[in-house]
Amino acid sequence: MNRSATRAPYFEASIPMTDSVRAPATAPNEPVDANAPVDLPNRIDIRDLDIYYGDFKAVEGVSMTINPRSVTALIGPSGCGKSTFLRSMNRMHEVIRGAYVDGEVIINGRNLYGPGVDPVAVRRKVGMVFQRPNPFPTMSIADNVLAGKKLNSKRMSKSVAAELVETSLRGANLWNEVKDRLDGPGSGLSGGQQQRLCIARAIAVEPDVLLMDEPCSALDPISTLAIEELMLELKNSYNIVIVTHNMQQAARVSDRTGFFNIEGTGKPGRLIEMDATEKIFSNPTEQQTQDYVTGRFG
Amino acid sequence: MSLTDIPPRPLESDERSNSDDAITSGSLAGAPMLGIFAGAVVIGALSWLPFGGVNWARWVIVTLLAYVIGTLIISRVVESPRQATDRFATAVMSSAFLLVMLPLVSVVWTVVERGANRFDWTFYSETMRGVIGEGGGGYHAIVGTLIVTSLTALFAIPFGLFTAIYLVEYANGSRFSKAVTALVDVMTGIPSIVAGLFAYALFVLIDGPGHRSGLAGAVALTLLMTPVVVRTSEEMLRLVPNELREASFALGVPRWRTITKVVLPTAIAGILTGIVLAVARVIGETAPLLVTVGITANLNKNPLSGRMATLPVFSYNSYKFPTLPPEASIDRAWTAALTLVLIVMVLFVTARILSSILKPKGLR
């Protein structure tokens, strides 16, 4: 298992990124086009996706390719449909009554919205971490990590379970903090630890893709740092998509960034531009993106 | 007109420093408030003293009135008007609470006092078989009540819980679920005698006229208990944060497992309390059991046929049709009532203990 891949030191990975934001527009010696689809497993291709809440069209005409082994950030003002779009990638969107999707989300050549696709099976392949940490209050820390397996009635021997708990918690950088109280309640942890517990819980089911919906917005800077560091590590094993309101965060952790915008209330959100993160933050093609990332947005 | 046209406000004017804006005032906290209450009690006592003979009702009412009015006036004089309103509202609410507590305490006291006469081993070990006059007991009625109530719980808990799960987890506000909710509300309001007559009529259709059985009684009580279980379980299930369901779905857990493994364990403490409340609601029902189960002097452990004694009906019957000497029957009636209160208390304590054990740690 390649889950604990070589750990990229946080600052090495993040500082060049922020530097490049200030760097001149034409990034020198960029070997590959960031927008070219990478031919690796777990690439996500989205084609002409419209997302509805009943009669209300929340997101319109999104097409994009999300490359594996990278972090893709989705930014944009509140209510522009970023989270809705994220939730449509593991069929969590339709949990809400009257919500449906029109279009294609293709992972590994299979359309998630094709006929006969079981949403439950999709969610086992595409994991999700939510804005607010939500460990199960009735379960211990260890049981929280095992929840995905146990709730799916997989029987595991004690040693296998213990190993999975350890690898998942190590993968979420939480093992050293909780190894002495694995039987304690998950809700007894701090907010940042709870969020990392939720990440451990999500990676314990070994998904191909990890979706994160503003995972740090309820956390302090230190916990945020821990989770960003974790994302840079996890991208070696998972295809990570993150929605964030924090543009510094997008600049620090992501390889590519998509900017969503909305024309006005009641109008659907659209993908305005998607490109390499440094390009979005230094020299975007669209004026709207430029305004948003420089804070001139009305 | 520009902002500079406004004349500067005098900083240290005399009217500001000593009237409305003052932030200090006298305080009635602690002993003075107790003093006001003591004074009210004395005034209450004075209201009947001149007329001779203790008049409890007048004492209580005048005391509470004097307390509320006295608090308002004294606090207004000594403290600020806002404080006075606060103290007044507090006084009104605590008086209302005391007033409501009075009948409750009185009922418990009366039942304990009168029930104590026959609170002996004979009552709990003997039936009324062949007993005329003194002696005898309510053993057969206790067994009957336990059988009928257990059967009721056996029917009503699954019906009620499954309905609640449907309404909260599956219905999604559909038209059918709204109809179910409305019908449950109607069922909550069914007079208990109607439930009894319905069950009786049902068993007459099956078995012929004059049918009496514990099962018929349980069916009548199920009609009364199910809506209570539905309502309380529904409330408790709705309290489970949606984030937990989403977290579970996002792990690829199917809905039914999410319900059994995440939602129900989180809500179980409240659901248990609700179920115990519902049992307490039906265990003391008399009218439906009178028409469906009847009363007998013998022990009948078979709920499928024959009359069965139950505590409420036994109590009613002993009081209404006493044998000679009547005191013996009446004492048995009170002890039966006391036993009923004790059973409900045991149920509540059990539910409390179970809830505190099962309550999820750290959930707000």
Image (tube, grey):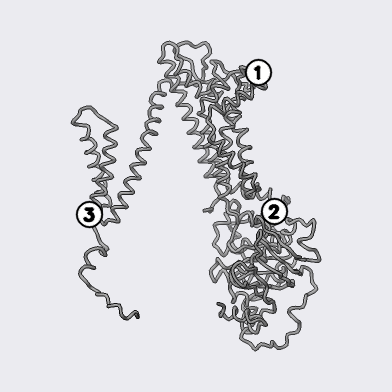
In the image, taking residue B250 as reference, residue B27 lies left or right, namely left
Q: How many tags in the picture?
A: 3
The answer to whether tags 3 and 1 share a subunit is: yes
Three-letter code for the amino acid on which mark 3 is drawn: Val
The answer to whether residue A255 is seen in the rendering is no
Res. B134 image quadrant = top left
User: Which callout, 3 or 1, points to the residue nearer the camera?
Assistant: 1
Q: Residues within 10 Å of mark 1 (few under 14, many from 20)?
A: few
Of B266 and B314, which appears nearest the observer?
B314
Residue at mark 2 to residue at mark 3: CA–CA distance: 64 Å
The answer to whether tags 2 and 1 share a subunit is: yes
The residue at 56%/16% (across/down) is B298
Compared with A53, A158 (above or below) is above
The answer to whether residue B97 is seen in the rendering is yes
User: Which callout, 2 or 1, points to the residue nearer the camera?
Assistant: 1
Residue on which disc 3 sits: B78
Residue at mark 3 to residue at mark 1: CA–CA distance: 76 Å
Cβ atoms at labels 2 and 1 below 8 Å apart: no
Q: Quadrant of the N terminus of chain B?
A: bottom left
Cβ atoms at labels 2 and 3 below 8 Å apart: no
Q: Residues within 10 Å of mark 3 (few under 14, many from 20)?
A: some
Residue on which disc 2 sits: B253
Residue on which disc 1 sits: B208
Could you tell which of marks 2 and 1 lies nearer the N-terminus? Answer: 1
